[in-house]
């Protein structure tokens, strides 16, 4: 497996509704790439929107990222 990113936790970081939707998709379906999350969500969100939301969750310490081949695989913590 690839290198894990460090956990950057910000105390009292609120989770937006859209971020919670991403977290639920990771909890229910397990680790996923941004493209796989898009398929699971079935929304009209753009790839970059999901990418941004997952990035925020990584920064807040709720999601971990693991680089596998060319794609990042995200896991809820």
Image (tube, rainbow, N blue to C red):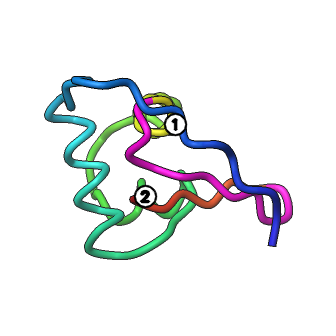
Q: Position of residue 31 (x, y in %)?
A: 49, 70
Indicate whether 12 appears above or below 72: above
Indicate whether 10 appears above or below 3: above
Question: Which quadrant: the N terminus?
Answer: bottom right
Q: Position of residue 23 (x, y in %)?
A: 29, 53
| Residue range highlighted in magenta | 60-70
39 sits to left or right of 41? right
Q: CA distance from mark 1 to mark 2?
A: 9 Å
Residue 64: image tag = none
Residue 24 lies in quadrant: bottom left
Residue 25 lies in quadrant: bottom left
Residue 51: image tag = 1
What residue is at 31 percent from the left and 49 percent from the top? Answer: 22
Q: Of the residues under marks 1 and 2, which one precedes in the sequence? A: 2
SS at circle 1 = helix
Q: Nearer the viewer, residue 4 or 26?
A: 4
Question: Which quadrant: the C terminus?
Answer: bottom left
Does the magenta run of residues contain 74?
no
Residue bearing mark 2 = 37
Indicate whether 27 appears above or below 24: below
Residue 10 lies in quadrant: top left
Q: Position of residue 51 (x, y in %)?
A: 52, 36
What residue is at 19 percent from the left and 25 percent from the top? Answer: 14
């Amino acid at each position: 497996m690839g290198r894990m990113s460090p956990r950057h936790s910000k105390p009292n970081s609120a989770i937006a509704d859209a971020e919670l939707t991403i977290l639920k998709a990771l909890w229910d379906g397990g680790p996923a790439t941004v493209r796989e999350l898009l398929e699971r969500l079935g929304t009209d969100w753009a790839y970059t929107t999901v990418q941004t939301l997952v990035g925020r969750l990584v920064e807040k310490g709720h999601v971990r990222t693991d680089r596998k081949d060319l794609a990042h695989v995200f896991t809820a913590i």
